[in-house]
Image (tube, helix red, strand yellow):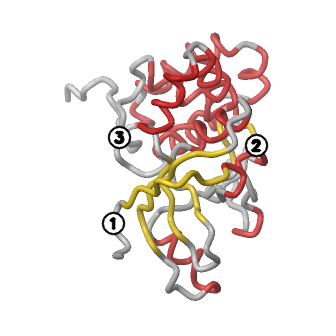
Amino acid sequence: MTTNAREPRVHPVPILSLRPTQMTVGMREVKEKRKRWREHDSKKQADLLGKHMIPVVYGPDKRYYVIDHHHLGRALHDEGVKEVLVTVVGDLRMVEREAFWGVMDNKRWVYPYDSKGERRPFRDLPKSVADLRDDPFRSLAGELRRLGGFAKDTTPFSEFLWADYLRRKLSRKAVDANFDKALEKALSAAKSKDAIYLPGWCGPADDD
């Protein structure tokens, strides 16, 4: 199997055996996914699990490393789901363990930044989706995109890049105290030319 193949694994994988490749999620977004999950009956839930497989990299330690859908994984775990289906995006079993995270970093399959936006050693990454921490600015960035503050983009971890930008514009205290008001300020900041370097920026065009 090549490192670029996508290979669905039809056998269910224990959700707590999946290893995250990021440190945080936006818990507000996780709660919204949980709410939507509970609105479906068991048949629809089973259909959704079949359609929304978790993309993973197969590591040299024979573990699956999640490279997307961390919010979904955490939401499903919190809702009591024990197993999920995965899609193997890359097979790195041949890579030496000491080189694994360097390869993951080079391929932009890992984002080892904490809730303050500071880079951490790979050893600090959570061991399961249950250990993912909350980053309110990631929730703010996710909601900002849904409101059209920036366009969906294929750049890896694009919403975390926006979260870091918003972290420099707003205090965490302000976000925690009044999310809706913080979102208004985020929308304004997103249109600024200060954000022109960010993926999906769709602020006002330069008339000069």
Residue indicated by mark 1 = 5
- Please tell me which of labels 3 and 1 falls first in the chain: 1
Q: CA distance from mark 3 to mark 2?
A: 24 Å
- Please tell me which of labels 1 and 2 falls first in the chain: 1
Disc 2, SS: strand
Q: Residue at x 66, y 49 (%)?
A: 15
Q: Residue at x 46, y 30 (%)?
A: 47
Q: Residue at x 47, y 31 (%)?
A: 48
Q: Please, what is the three-letter code of the amino acid marked with disc 1?
A: Ala
Say left or right for 97 vs 51. right
Figure quadrant of residue 147 = top left
- From the image, state whether disc 3 or disc 2 is nearer to you: 2
Across and down, in percent, residue 60 comes to 59, 80
Q: Residue furthest left?
A: 208
Figure quadrant of residue 78 = top right
Disc 1, SS: loop
Quadrant of the image containing the C terminus: top left
| Position of 95 relative to 54 (above/below) | below
Residue indicated by mark 3 = 153
Q: Please, what is the three-letter code of the amino acid marked with disc 3?
A: Asp
Residue indicated by mark 2 = 133
Q: Please, what is the three-letter code of the amino acid marked with disc 2?
A: Arg
Say left or right for 181 vs 108. right
Across and down, in percent, residue 91 comes to 45, 73
